[in-house]
Amino acid sequence: MKFSMSSPSTRRVGWGLALLVLVLFPLLVESGTEEVTRWIPLAVAGIGLNLLTGFNGQVSIGHGAFFGLGAYACGIWVNDHDGQFLMGFIVAIVLSFLAGAIVGLPALRIRGLALALMTIAVGTLFPDIIRQFEGLTGGSSGLAIQTLTVNGRGKLQDRTTEWLAPGWSGISSNQWRFYIFATIAVICVAMVAALIRSRTGRALIAIRDNEVAAETNGIAVDRLKVITFGLSAALAGIGGAMFALIDFNLTPDPFNLTFSLNLLVIVVIGGSGTILGPVVGALSVGLFNDVIVKKVLPADLGLLGPVILGVTLVLSMQFAPAGTVGSIKHTIEERQLKRRIASPPAS
Amino acid sequence: MSAFFQYCVIGLSNGAVYAMVAMSLVIIYRATGLLNFAQGETSLIATFVVWEAHDRGLPLPLALIIGMIAGFLLGAVLQRVAVQPAGDPATAPLQLVIVTIGLLLVLNNTAGLIWGNESKVFDPMFGPSSVNVGGVTIAAQQIGTVAVLLVEALALVAVFRFTKIGLAMRSVASNAEASGLSGIPVARILVISWGIAGGIGAIAGTFAAPNLGMDATLFLKILVLSFAAMTIGGFDSLLGAIVGGLVVGLITDVLPRYVDWLKEMPLAPAVLLILAVLLVRPQGLFGSKQVRRV
């Protein structure tokens, strides 16, 4: 059998290997589990932004706002309802979907650059909104997510919420959290992949490629654009909800414009308009920021990290504008094409 | 009532800085059709050069000229080395946005590496004196900022209208391909446009720094407000950038003092204004309308 990347059986083996790595990683590399866990929310938010920007062609530079909204929605819910994580996620998803759809509404009339600038404004505004509504969000001093727990002397007491691995599993709470997050991420990837391959997904891409042609072919462009914005924001909200459940402590500062720009970097570096691109992007950016900058570079040259990242961005856009996954895909397709030309199949 | 006018004076002089940066964004947008996220940081480096020259004993006006030259060179080099090779903004807008974000990171942190993180003292060019008009204190620096903005705008208009290079720049902005065919050195014109934008950055920084503090974060907030100004005014209009800048300065400085729930989010009225303007006129107040062919 000839080896080919695109044949279904090879693909299945590839996915199987990837899942195996996900399952084994926290068991083999326990010390790195916490760091990798922190990259998963970024990957999920990146998948969301990619759905909007990569597949549907609407550029958003304010997705940090939806991420933050998901984080605060989940955080406040879990805080008020003593550790109902699942319900926290659902609240985060619903609220960020609605917020995304509302921001997406003007996108029907405002497009391209103006839309990008609108989303910058939304993204910049978000931390200020958190500071403004201090009573609900804790403002600048932050929101600690706490649960009523019974302490050693049998008294009820508010303590910082934590992850508790079920006793039968015999794994640490860090590993437990990793598995939960990885499962959520895999579900998100699978859902987006299914969506993109469906009729609706092809309609999304058609809108990106040529809106007028899409409309003449009977695609309900307006409705689909708003829904995509909502879905994209909901995925960012899921990422945010996970983020809230890592440290159980939220402040408005992380959800600034830089964060939104980072998400865009994750999408484009990984490969915009590819299913796995944002995952690869989040892993690369995470690896760079948390491992290379913090552990390899000397500490007094901390500012050199962003400089290197910036140079990498500029260079990679010159030499691999399709991103990591996009470039790999192109190379494989090219090679297959060459092979087909060299040896035409016997008919 | 005099308090109200006092706030307006502050708003207008801050708005003049946003207007200057917005003008440089507009020049770059007109020339290359690109949203330049690195514009603030190009200006930052140019402003640090002004500070450095002044710190070494040069008078501030002379230091400003040196900074403008530095900004011009920096803008020109960035266009040539990083932006030009990344492709055409019309076909790969997202990639070019990422390139300018990359430049933002490089320039911002390079400034931090060279000049450190602590805030520097930046002398106001027009001195610390002020006049009192009917209970409203107006600093010479504030009058100066608005005056410089006007001079700068007139100078730019003069360049665009009456010089050969300005004519070439307008021609490239309207149709680069046809300009190239009629013998205009398009690549050089683009480099010059970026240079001019960088030079303006030095002026904007020189008038922003005494008020906001000279450090590496100076332009991060200004850039967002200048984007807002650019959006309100229309992307490709210099007049729009000026009006937009002043309007953004006014509403972000005046409104939050009177409306309690805006105190922590001065940007909110600006965002609502952008939304309102764009929904009624998607091309902005003074922008040229984009016709979509169907």
Image (cartoon, coloured by chain):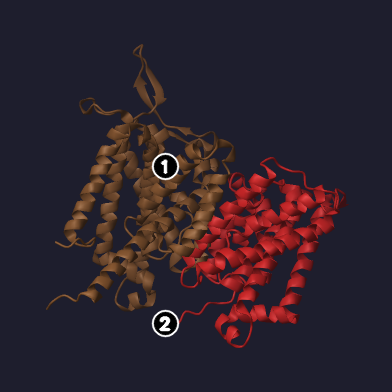
Chain colours: A brown, B red
Does residue A336 appear anywhere in the picture? yes
Nearest to the observer: residue A157 or residue B276: A157
> Please, which residue is most extreme toward the left here?
A347
Answer left or right for B278 relative to B213: left
Image coordinates of residue B246 in percent, x first then y, are 69, 61
Are the residues under marks 1 and 2 on the same chain? no
Instruction: Please give the label number shown on residue A167.
Output: none
Chain for numbered disc 1: A
Image coordinates of residue A224 in percent, x first then y, are 34, 65
Query: Could you say whether the residue bearing mark 2 is in a helix, strand or loop?
Result: loop
Question: In this picture, is B235 found above or below A261?
Answer: below
Image coordinates of residue A101 in percent, x first then y, are 39, 58
Instruction: Please give the label number shown on residue A71.
Output: 1
Question: In this picture, is B294 found above or below A31?
Answer: below
Nearest to the observer: residue A114 or residue A281: A281
Query: Could you say whether the residue bearing mark 1 is in a helix, strand or loop?
Result: helix
Answer left or right for A208 relative to A262: left
Q: Amino acid at mark 2?
A: Val
> Please, which residue is most extreme toward the bottom here?
B182
Image coordinates of residue B127 in percent, x first then y, are 86, 50
What residue is drawn where x is 67% and y is 42%?
B116
Q: Residues within 10 Å of mark 2 (few under 14, many from 20)?
A: few
Q: Amino acid at mark 1?
A: Ala
Q: How many marks?
A: 2
Q: Does the CB distance between marks 1 and 2 fall below 8 Å?
A: no
Which quadrant, please, contains the C terminus of chain A? Answer: bottom left
Question: In this picture, is A221 found above or below B226?
Answer: below
Which quadrant, please, contains the N terminus of chain A? Answer: bottom left
Residue B36 falls in image quadrant: bottom right
To which residue does mark 2 refer? B294
